[in-house]
Amino acid sequence: MTLLKQIPKVDKFIKNKIFENYSSKLITKIAKDKINKLREDILSNNVDNIDEQRLIDDVISEYEYITKPSLEKVINATGIIVHTNLGRSLITQKSFDKVKSLVSSYNNLEYDLKKGKRGERYSHIVKTLQNLTGCEDALVVNNNASAVFLILNTFAKNKEAVVSRGELVEIGGSFRVPEVMSQSGAILKEIGTTNKTHKKDYEEAINSNTSILMKVHKSNYSIEGFTSEVALEDIIDIANKNKVIDYYDMGSGHMIDLPYNLDKNEPSILKIMQHNPSLISFSGDKLLGSVQAGIILGKKELIKQIKKNQLLRMLRVDKITLSLLEVHLNSYLKDELEDIPTLKMLYTSTQTLNKRAQYIKENLQNICNCEIIETSSLIGGGTTPNRKIPTIALSIEYKDFKPNKIEELLRKNNLITRIENEKVLLDFRSIQEAELDEIVTIIKKVFK
Ligand SMILES: *Cc1c(COP(=O)(O)O)cnc(C)c1O
């Protein structure tokens, strides 16, 4: 009973000077909860004294736990440049600075400054994309999954969309082509076989209810051996002859040629646009190296029809997306590719990566066992299936710690590594130059 009388009163408790710099609303809520809990504990005889200082500490640590941002910076030492779990493409401070004042002030997002009338949200990137790719028109939506859905819903609802059986893929995060198609209202017309699809398969599939010949980038798988698929330019040709739409879901969407022959069977957006396709779509944050978005390029008349679809209103993008995308597209136009980290990482030479590995190795000399090794990295993000590029990695060993243990210790300090052949590796392909000292600090802290 006496203990119950000693329970602090919430009103008085929260007046403590220590809470001055915290939100009183949130502190009051937490304090109420903690004090109620304390009362219950006393009633069930779980407490034998009241420690007010502990109560204060509990309230503050709960406050800090609740208000700590859940999204935190990590260092990507997996080597996977387009890592969907780690946020895909990076945006440089420089690019970010360019849009800062724009997004923190009012702007002409949907306002025509010349006419003083309502303008078009999508107009801002059209000119840049036209100059860059030669497209007739363009549209940007939330991501490429929504671009696929929007296109099919606009043109193939209750109509047939022809797709090769070799391209009915599932991409990470539950994007399955057949399911997306059926949800959009399109009738899937499968043609060919898993390993082979021929021109005549497309030609013979076309009937009066056919709307689209669709090609899908295989993204995260490849088939080898006895295979054949129809080139996009042939599909475009068949579509034109039969007056139906051709549409290529490019997925990754690299604007320009890639190093290491990565694009051997996968022409760039610039090359594809030379064939004058009806419609193509691709992600903004895979190999393009910009923000999350789905970019649609194609014929003016078709884009006009897509814009009439009510769904567009639900998939529309914000000024932050549009302004950053414009900055990046301009970097392509002006050939300032160093402002696009995804490309920069892809193009960094192994000699440079080696120097960075050397730097870390030297700084960790008396801390753990490090060895520089030559290996290869996957690009990730469903970009170039099974293709690897050369890289330099540093293996980390410490006492008799198992690789899983080391990986976990580093991960819990926001350094994400990978395990290859029983060794924990820091793969320099995806590590930023500015992060080298941070890595040294983390490893020193973990193995102190
Ligand atoms: C990645 C991918 C998508 C989905 O794109 P998001 O931008 O992640 O929505 C769709 N199709 C293909 C072929 C892809 O590779």
Image (cartoon, helix red, strand yellow):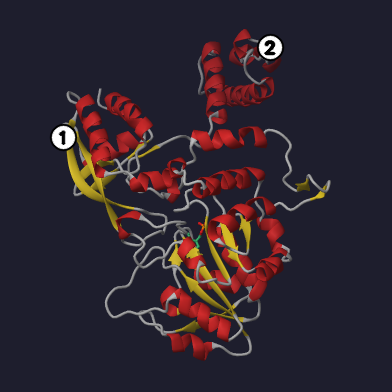
Answer whether labels 2 and 1 touch (C-beta < 8 Å): no
Q: x%, y% of residue 283?
A: 51, 57
Residue nearest the viewer, comparing 410 with 306: 306
**Where residue 292 appears, x then y in whole percent?**
54, 50
Marks 2 and 1, how far apart at CA: 54 Å
Q: Residues within 10 Å of mark 2 (few under 14, many from 20)?
A: few
In this view, the residue in front, 167 or 256, is 256
Tell whether 19 sits left or right of 393. Answer: right
Amino acid residing under circle 1: Asp
Point out the residue furthest to the top here. 17
Q: Is mark 2 within 8 Å of ligand 1?
A: no
Q: Say whether residue 114 is left or right of residue 234.
A: right
Q: What residue is at 36 percent from the left and 34 percent from the top? A: 412
The answer to whether residue 272 is above or below residue 89 is below
Q: Nearer the viewer, residue 65 or 310?
A: 310
Image spot of residue 366 (x, y percent): 17, 23
Q: Of the two numbered discs 2 and 1 on the same chain, state the one appearing first in sequence.
A: 2
- What secondary structure is marked by label 2? helix
Q: Which residue is mark 1?
A: 400
Q: Which residue is depicted at the point 71% across and 15% down? A: 11
Badge 1 density bin: few <14, some 14–19, many ≥20, Cα 10 Å: few
Relative height, residue 392 to residue 4 (above, below): below
Q: Is residue 333 above or below residue 370?
A: below
* Res 291 visible: no
Q: Residue at x 33, y 41 (%)?
A: 77
Residue 236 visible? The answer is yes
- The N terminus appears in which quarter of the rendering? top right
The disc labelled 2 sits on which kind of residue? Answer: Lys
Q: Which residue is mark 2?
A: 12
Residue drawn at x 46%, y 74% is 232
